[in-house]
Image: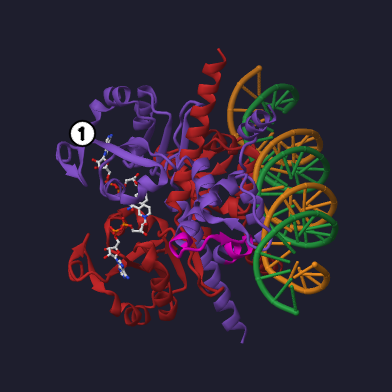
Chain colours: A red, B purple, C green, D orange
Amino acid sequence: MLENESNIEKEIKMIPEPTLRRFPQYIHLLKRLRKESTQYISSTTIADELELDSIQVRKDLAITGVVGKPKLGFDIDELISALSNILNWDNSTDAFLVGAGSLGSALLGYKNFNQYGLNIVAAFDNDPNKIGKTISGIEVLPLEKFGNMVERMKVHIGIITAPPEAAQKIAEVMVQSGIQAIWNFSSIHLKVPFNIIVEDALLTQSLGVLTHTLSEKLKKEIAVLEKQ
Amino acid sequence: MLENESNIEKEIKMIPEPTLRRFPQYIHLLKRLRKESTQYISSTTIADELELDSIQVRKDLAITGVVGKPKLGFDIDELISALSNILNWDNSTDAFLVGAGSLGSALLGYKNFNQYGLNIVAAFDNDPNKIGKTISGIEVLPLEKFGNMVERMKVHIGIITAPPEAAQKIAEVMVQSGIQAIWNFSSIHLKVPFNIIVEDALLTQSLGVLTHTLSEKLKKEIAVLEKQ
DNA sequence: TTTTAATCGATATATTTGTATCGATAAAAA
DNA sequence: TTTTTATCGATACAAATATATCGATTAAAA
Ligand SMILES: NC(=O)c1ccc[n+]([C@@H]2O[C@H](COP(=O)([O-])OP(=O)(O)OC[C@H]3O[C@@H](n4cnc5c(N)ncnc54)[C@H](O)[C@@H]3O)[C@@H](O)[C@H]2O)c1
Ligand SMILES: NC(=O)c1ccc[n+]([C@@H]2O[C@H](COP(=O)([O-])OP(=O)(O)OC[C@H]3O[C@@H](n4cnc5c(N)ncnc54)[C@H](O)[C@@H]3O)[C@@H](O)[C@H]2O)c1
């Protein structure tokens, strides 16, 4: 009964987004370390490796329910499976991709997605030159077939790698077809019903931080030079 | 004198990172709206479009120094140029890319980067089959040439699209060569000197949020069904 | 066996980020 | 011209996130 109660608790208490976003980083690191046959790792070591605060690491890991041993740290395998389970990376979910251009092709060819809970099973495009071709073993189908295939194959994830102008319409087709979550690589903000999950892969956001920070750095360096 | 003082202020006061990360979104939206020849836009409209809070939008935009007009809102062109200036998107910075694989090729072929302050001028790889080939008009060079070329061309930005195992070594080559900022697409956390800027394009982080959120949603839906 | 020291994890505090309130302003309507 | 109203922007408040403190624990050293 108590067991049950705590399970419900776990489901209700949402994981803070910053924590959730650090989980993949932990998994990457832990998988790398496991190859070197380390068994235990301390929060301080993780913090060192990822340049985080060890207290923050401990707090993040507390969410997994994995308990650490004083003087040793955490069992790496336990952490990996707990984290993978939370992200649902311990089994892959099928996905359809729309927009078989250059970025789409890169995603279609990426072998590691199965480690990250994703399995791209079909690609769609509206360019007659692309339809019928095969990219990394995945056939490119006409967009018209999208709806039927989603229903037939019970696919939940849609990936948009089409140009921004087309993205909103594609999102609407996806929602209509029963897609529950959209991974959006276009730069526009998609408008979808509240119960549909949208996650943006914001490349230009990341680029913006880079270009801004760099320009501030260079400005400062010039200012220092001028003072001398 | 006062003018000068406020300029120093501006340089010293760092822009909050969440705000900075919203700037590209604003730019994307504003550029789209400008095409429709709208001149003014209110914070409430922006908030509506991007599903943000209008107060937050106003606070973000306040940082640009652009002042809005009551009852009308902000001048779109003014906002675009102020935001672009902060991100340094109003002139492009040259960049070198290392790892001319599928993701690298997608980046090399992406025409819009010049709108986002980036200009990829050369690509490097260590695969003899790739060296000498041309991708989207950019020649792939042997990694050995990296150092010299950076010095000669005074390039500040390095992009890593090589496998994770190679990424740290490549980062070290970049730092040695004088690269100041690294855009990292590999999943590992790069260790570089404190004064080098690293910005990670965390695709798997974004994917993790998606797969987790979807699995929670599906779990909840099943729980509801079972209760009936 | 006893001591030492690294680590965990609970609780408390600080910082950052987001949201609400409200008077001032100026465009548009009356 | 006067009134109305949408919006701005300053200030105050709330929530989320990060960091600090410290006793409890246990592996390893003495
Ligand atoms: N390539 C990059 O490096 C990069 C970087 C950042 C963002 N993006 C974004 O990712 C998306 C894809 O970029 P890309 O470089 O691969 O572009 P691309 O032009 O190479 O590919 C786009 C593909 O979408 C297809 N398409 C167009 N309209 C469609 C529609 N209505 N239905 C179905 N398919 C349609 C096109 O036929 C094409 O195959 C764009 O939104 C772009 O802004 C790309
Ligand atoms: N493709 C994707 O969709 C995707 C998604 C998420 C993350 N990533 C990451 O992006 C990176 C690139 O992925 P990809 O799919 O393009 O891989 P890829 O194998 O297609 O390309 C990697 C390229 O790097 C080159 N390379 C390898 N070692 C090198 C070295 N020491 N010096 C210079 N070049 C070297 C290879 O020759 C190859 O051309 C990887 O780190 C991957 O984990 C890719």
Where is residue B164? Give x, y as percent.
36, 41
Where is residue B67? Give x, y as percent.
64, 50
Visible in this render: residue A99?
yes
Quadrant in which residue A132 is drawn: bottom left
Start-end of magenta stretch = B33-48
- Residue drawn 36% across and 68% down? A166
- Residue drawn 55% across and 22% down? A223
Q: Is residue B81 above or below residue A184?
A: above
Question: What is the quadrant of the C terminus of chain B in the image?
Answer: bottom right
Report the residue marked by disc 1: B141
- Residue drawn 52% across and 17% down? A225
Task: Kindly identify the amino acid type of the residue bearing the numbered disc 1.
Answer: Leu
Instruction: State left or right for residue B3 relative to residue A51.
Output: right
Instruction: State left or right for residue B220 relative to residue C3.
Output: left
Secondary structure of the residue carrying tag 1 is strand
Where is residue B10? Give x, y as percent.
63, 35
Q: Is residue B47 magenta?
A: yes
Where is residue B57? Give x, y as percent.
63, 56
Visible in this render: residue A93?
no
- Residue drawn 56% across and 54% down? A20
Viewer-closest of A214 and A57: A214
Count of labels in the image: 1
